[in-house]
Image (cartoon, rainbow, N blue to C red):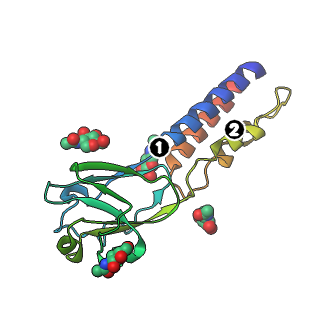
Amino acid sequence: MAKLLLVLVCFLVTFGVTLIRTNATTYTVGDNSGWDVSTDLETWPQGKKFYVGDALLFQYSSIYSVCEVTRENYDSCNTSNVIATYTDGNTTIPLSKPGEMYFVCGEELYCLGGMKLQVNVLTNSTAGAPQAQSTLPQPSSKTNSPSAILPSTGVVHNNGRDSFVMVFLGFMATMLWMVQI
Ligand SMILES: *[C@@H]1O[C@H](CO)[C@@H](O)[C@H](O)[C@H]1NC(C)=O
Ligand SMILES: *[C@@H]1O[C@H](CO)[C@@H](O)[C@H](O)[C@H]1NC(C)=O
Ligand SMILES: *[C@@H]1O[C@H](CO)[C@@H](O)[C@H](O)[C@H]1NC(C)=O
Ligand SMILES: CC(=O)N[C@H]1CO[C@H](CO)[C@@H](O)[C@@H]1O
């Protein structure tokens, strides 16, 4: 019985970690309005948390472009020296490192008209999840408490972002506990 349980726990942990790791979010900039001079791009990022591993999807018409720029050039809408330029109309930009990222429209006038975006990319994602393995129960352990069986609390530290996973793992832990009795 203990062996079966261990296998189940291993499976769950693996499954849970996979679930967390594949939970990268792609944000469509401006939502349905897209990357457009009429979109309120200043308020769009508010209330959102961008993590390393997420991505921004810029959707825009061919009169626009997307330029990643430095902070100085963002402030002044200076696109003479950009980090990267995209013009394909449907651009996915991965948020691969923490820190501020700045985007403007390549047309200075649109940029001055508010077509610019600043996002703060956070590190507090679940990338370090495998640490949960160190708390796996020993096969000889005779504990009956669900909290001892499932090390899920060690997995997630990001303000309820993956609360679905937590609830799911908690549910499975309870199920396991009942099966064991
Ligand atoms: C724009 O930035 C470049 C270098 O980043 C600088 O050489 C140029 O003077 C700037 N242009 C304006 C109008 O500020
Ligand atoms: C735009 O890109 C996204 C992600 O790469 C893709 O899912 C979507 O189908 C694309 N849309 C169009 C209109 O090409
Ligand atoms: C992670 O989030 C906590 C609070 O939720 C915060 O105190 C901490 O500074 C964050 N760490 C990083 C690296 O962002
Ligand atoms: C499956 C899963 O956990 N999805 C979550 C991914 O993260 C977003 C927010 O960042 C949640 O809304 C999803 O529920």
Q: Position of residue 164 (x, y in %)?
A: 49, 45
Q: Alpha-carbon neighbours of circle 1 within 10 Å: few (<14), some, or many (≥20)?
A: some
Rendered image quadrant of residue 67: bottom left
The residue located at (41%, 70%) in the rendering is 70
Q: Secondary structure at mark 1?
A: loop
Nearest the camera: 85 or 91?
85
Q: Look at discs 2 and 1 and give the one toward the viewer.
A: 1
Is 149 located above or below residue 52 in the figure?
Answer: above
The residue located at (52%, 49%) in the rendering is 163
Is 180 located above or below residue 16 in the figure?
Answer: above
Is 156 located above or below residue 22 in the figure?
Answer: below
The residue located at (41%, 74%) in the rendering is 71
10 sits left or right of 103 in the view: right
Spot the residue most to the bottom. Answer: 76
Q: Quadrant of the N terminus?
A: top right
Nearest the camera: 67 or 36?
67
Please tell me in which quarter of the rendered image ligand 1 is found. Answer: bottom left
Q: How many marks?
A: 2
Q: Quadrant of the C terminus?
A: top right
The residue located at (27%, 59%) in the rendering is 66
Q: Position of residue 13 (x, y in %)?
A: 64, 34
Q: Which mark is residue 150?
A: 2
67 sits left or right of 143 in the view: left
Q: Which mark is residue 23?
A: 1
Three-letter code, disc 2 = Leu
- Ligand 4 near label 1 (Cβ, under 8 Å)? yes
